[in-house]
Amino acid sequence: MTITLALSKGRIFDETLPMLARAGIEVLEDPERSRKLILPTSRADLRVVLVRASDVPTYVQYGGADLGVAGKDVLLEHDGTGLYQPLDLRIARCRMSVAVRDDYDYAGAVRQGSRIRVATKYTQTARQHFADKGVHVDLIKLYGSMELAPLTGLADAIVDLVSTGSTLKANHLVEVERIMDISSRLVVNQAALKLKREPLRALIDAFAAAVAEKP
Ligand code: PRT
Ligand code: MG
């Protein structure tokens, strides 16, 4: 019975690696050097598949992978049917925030009840956030480089992930609201959890032990 773990290249892969190592599992190929999308591990019954970060829930939901690691940002935009989320891995941490140009009076616009144009990849989360605040927004869906939107006049504000804040700073943007803290979660296919119960439970427990060891 082979188990397939879906990861995205970059920070999620890099931060999941040490957690696997604590469980005695080594990924046998480096995704930055190889063009392979299926990577063997030191355990014959476990393989890693590399997918786009936003595709991880889809792979797991439809059984293309038994489990995966996905950011809360991605999961909130995805309909969670068929996904079991047993664990916050506390990796790839950042926050989701509202940011504007440093010369834009966000508080004033909100106070006056103006309609604000907001560009984001995270339309569900943004819609919910502004609805909760009673702020009227027009949402513009983007797939990347959100920081550019306020600089070009496409939008008044963006909703994006912030980690060090240096991307905002480099583009003369300021964080005006923190919406929520973000970290990556383990997601498991519910049908697989029944069919491959023993090995999946063991893996989830190993991840849980690795999380518990984290400072
Ligand atoms: O890059 P790609 O388009 O393939 O997909 P992706 O951007 O969804 O993947 P990836 O690997 O970049 O991010 C995977 C997950 O890491 C996200 O879903 C988040 O849960 C998490 N994460 C943690 C982050 C960041 N920190 C982060 N800083 N994802 C993105 N960023 C970006 C942010 O969007 C902004 O452009 O980094 C920039 C800000 O960083 P600072 O340090 O300058 O503030
Ligand atoms: Mg990225």
Image (spheres, helix red, strand yellow):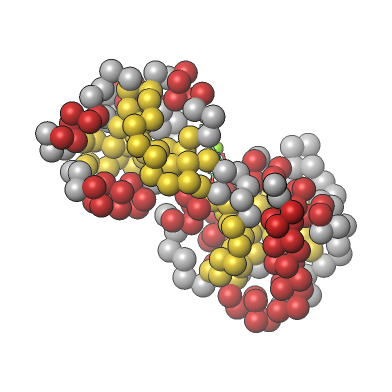
Residue 185: x and y in percent read: 58, 57
State the residue at coordinates (48%, 35%).
162
Residue 213: x and y in percent read: 74, 54
Counting labels gives 0
For this rendering, which residue is in front, 40 or 109? 109
User: Looking at the figure, which quarter contains the N terminus?
Assistant: bottom right
Residue 157 is at least partly visible in this image: yes
Q: Residue furthest front?
A: 215
125 to 172, vertically: above or below: below
88 on left or right of 127: right
Residue 182: x and y in percent read: 50, 47
For this rendering, which residue is in front, 49 or 126? 126
72 on left or right of 60: left
- The answer to which quarter of the image holds residue 135 is top left
181 to 155, vertically: above or below: below
Residue 190: x and y in percent read: 58, 75
Quadrant location, ligand no. 2: top right
State the residue at coordinates (24%, 29%).
106
183 to 148, vertically: above or below: below
For this rendering, which residue is in front, 177 or 204? 177
121 on left or right of 152: right
State the residue at coordinates (24%, 35%).
117
